[in-house]
Amino acid sequence: MRFIKDKNKIYFDNAKMGPIYKELHDWKISYEKELYEKKSNLREGYQVFFFELKELIKKFFCAEESDVLLSNSFTSAFQKILINIKDDLKFLCVKNDYPSIVQSIKNLKFKLEEIEYSNNIEEELIKSLIKYKPNILVISIVQYIDGLKLNLDFIKELKKNNKNLLIIGDGTQYSGTEKFNFDESGFDIIISSGYKWLHAGYGNAIALIKKSCFSSKFLKNDRLIVHNMFDGGHLDLYSFGSLKFSLSIIEKEINLISTKIKFLTKKMIEGLKKRNLLSDVKNKRLVHSSIFNIDDEDGKLQSFLSKNNIIASRRGKGCRISLAYYNTENEIQLFFNLLDSFYHSTLNIETPESELLP
């Protein structure tokens, strides 16, 4: 994948949107031309296209034994799952998890318990399962605010010890960052939007659901009805064509992508630790994502970085930085030079002006 960069800017905002790369951009242009020329004839082979896409998704996520459902966003897919869940079941979520998770559950009037967000999230989950006795756990694999990443081995063990617990994962901030085996994971359902780490643009999302869910006590509708809720109407060939195109490339490069992201994450952790800027959530955990949140209650850091051509997002009370595999070690160093300049008075670190990003 070739990402066309603005030489005067550093993009540290993949957690908000994964940029479109050159090959996908060219495909989108060619598809628009085909749509203009062929009109309705372009929809010939519609069923074959989606069969091939679902087979590719199964291969990508190691979900050969599971079902693939498609939707236009995480939220729409999650809501379709929710309306198929029995009304008397109790949910467990994490406070301050992705808003669409908690709000969608509340909107449908399900019983809901929320646990406090902490760097010991796995311990909190165990305590909460004992205390609240929920039927369903919904949780992000990687938290959108600060990048806390669940220990996937823990989730696998959790499911093994709680077979009557349905575990639903939001994979939007995770899918595409490393190889993942859904069939062997502890999750029963995973939903991921494609516009972040899958670099597939807007309008596409994937729901993976294990077949055991259809014969369990959790769903009030059978497999055919659930599939019809997702497959009814028309799915956008343009959006899902983008997803298919991206998956076919990332599937071949996932090990390279994962290695690069882990390398950049290590460099970022080292630099933030040196400056006492690594959050407790990151500092006390062994497993890390490439998303970081630096305290910035007044928004001055965010403004400073923006003025110096570093693109990041404000999330919660901090400035969120997210690294993708197209980022470089040099970009991280330039970022730290700017941080040293911003915190000069408190960190007492001298930064030569020549090293600052123009």
Image (spheres, rainbow, N blue to C red):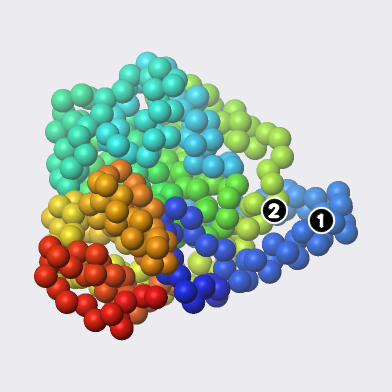
- Measuring 37% from the left and 39% from the top, which residue is drawn there? 98
Image quadrant containing the C terminus: bottom left
Q: Is 155 left, or right, of 53 in this rendering?
A: left
Image quadrant occupied by the N terminus: bottom right
Q: Residue at x 34, y 79 (%)?
A: 330
> In the depicted view, which residue is nearer to us: 31 or 221?
31
Q: Looking at this view, is 327 or 190 the one in front? A: 327
Say if 182 sits above or below 31 in the image: above
Q: Is residue 283 left or right of residue 187?
A: left
Residue 262 position, x and y percent, is 31, 69
Type of the residue with mark 1: Leu
Q: CA distance from mark 2 to mark 1?
A: 9 Å
Look at the numbered discs 2 and 1 and tell me whether their residues touch, using CB distance below 8 Å: yes
Q: Residues within 10 Å of mark 2 (few under 14, many from 20)?
A: some
Q: Quadrant of residue 34?
A: bottom right
Residue identifier under label 2 = 238
Asked if residue 188 is positioned above or below residue 202 in the image, the reply reads above
Residue positioned 78% across, 53% down in the render: 45
Query: Which numbered disc covers residue 35?
Result: 1
Q: Quick check: can you spot residue 105?
A: yes
- Secondary element at tag 1: helix
Q: Is residue 142 visible?
A: no
Percent x, y of residue 136: 33, 30
Secondary structure at badge 2 equals helix
Question: What amino acid does circle 2 point to?
Answer: Tyr
Q: How many marks?
A: 2
